[in-house]
Image (cartoon, grey):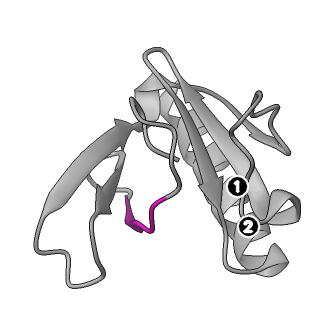
């Protein structure tokens, strides 16, 4: 879901353990970087976020949130398995980063 304008748009996410960030792009060709989420900025990762009025997820059962100091990122995974993998990877990376 977009940051300023709360509409749902498809994005391509890349997990980068070396640089300790999630990079997201407009498409899977990764031609245009849209933004990054630094592991050290992640406060919480949780399932089934309260999205508020007018912000309905295209698939609530596959929706999860990544909360950072600046922003709440609401994401929809393509499958339940993909959602579990992404959530586990993000939580693990954020926890590992707090050790440094």
Tell me residue 36's x, y (percent).
29, 44
User: In the picture, which quadrant includes the C terminus?
Assistant: top left
- Outermost residue on the top side: it is 69
User: At x 50% / y 48%, what residue is drawn?
Assistant: 7
**Is residue 45 toward the left or the right of residue 3 in the image?**
right
**Is residue 64 toward the left or the right of residue 5 in the image?**
right
Tell me residue 18's x, y (percent).
29, 55
Q: Are marks 1 and 2 in contact (CB under 8 Å)?
A: yes
Q: Is residue 99 magenta?
A: no
Report the residue marked by disc 2. Answer: 83
**Is residue 20 toward the left or the right of residue 1 in the image?**
left
Tell me residue 40's x, y (percent).
43, 27
Report the residue marked by disc 1. Answer: 87
- Outermost residue on the left side: it is 31
When asked about the image quadrant of residue 54, the answer is top right
Nearer to me, 99 or 75: 75
Give the residues in magenta: 9-15
How many numbered discs sit on the rendered protein?
A: 2
Question: Is any atom of residue 28 visible in this view?
Answer: yes
Question: Is any atom of residue 99 visible in this view?
Answer: no
């Amino acid at each position: 879901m977009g940051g300023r304008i709360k509409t749902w748009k498809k994005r391509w996410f890349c997990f980068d353990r070396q640089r300790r960030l999630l990079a997201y792009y407009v498409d899977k060709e990764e031609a245009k970087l849209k933004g990054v989420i630094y592991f050290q900025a992640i406060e919480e990762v949780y399932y089934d976020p309260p999205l508020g009025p007018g912000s309905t997820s295209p698939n609530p059962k596959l929706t999860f949130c990544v909360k950072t100091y600046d922003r709440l990122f609401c994401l929809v995974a393509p499958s339940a398995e993909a959602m579990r993998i992404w959530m586990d990877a993000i939580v693990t990376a954020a926890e590992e980063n707090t050790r440094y």
